[in-house]
């Protein structure tokens, strides 16, 4: 069974028998961490690591103003 990465739309093949709710997988394509929020139906959600490292969020106004 394949689910689509919410971040990059890359199909991720997951065997529902091999994962449990709360388990964390990683997308091969974009490297994002995905938590198994449901196994029936199989559903993944991006793990929010806000607070751990905000480097990615500081470029918000960077591109517009110089
Ligand atoms: Zn991805």
Image (spheres, grey):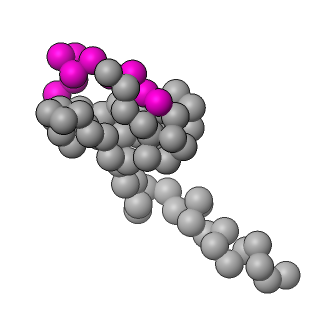
> Residue 58: percent from the left, percent from the top?
61, 69
Q: Quadrant of the C terminus?
A: bottom right
Q: Measuring 56% from the left and 66% from the top, which residue is drawn there? A: 57
Q: Is residue 55 magenta?
A: no
Q: 13 and 48: which one is in front?
A: 13
Q: Residue at x 56, y 38 (%)?
A: 30
Tally of marks: 0
What kind of secondary structure does the magenta stretch mostly adopt? loop
Image location (x, y in percent) of residue 33: 41, 39
Position of residue 5 in the picture relative to residue 56 (left or right): left
State which region is magenta.
11-20
Looking at the image, residue 46 lies above or below residue 24: below
Q: Which residue is nearer to you in this view: 63 or 37?
A: 37
Q: Quadrant of residue 34?
A: top left
Q: Is 60 on the left-hand or right-hand side of 15?
A: right
One can see residue 28 in this view: yes
């Amino acid at each position: 069974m394949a689910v689509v990465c919410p971040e990059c739309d890359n199909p991720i093949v997951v065997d529902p028998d091999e994962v449990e709710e709360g388990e964390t997988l990683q997308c091969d394509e974009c490297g994002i961490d995905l938590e198994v929020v449901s196994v029936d139906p199989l559903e993944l959600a991006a793990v929010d690591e806000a607070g751990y490292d905000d480097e990615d969020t500081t470029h918000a106004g960077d591109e517009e103003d110089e």
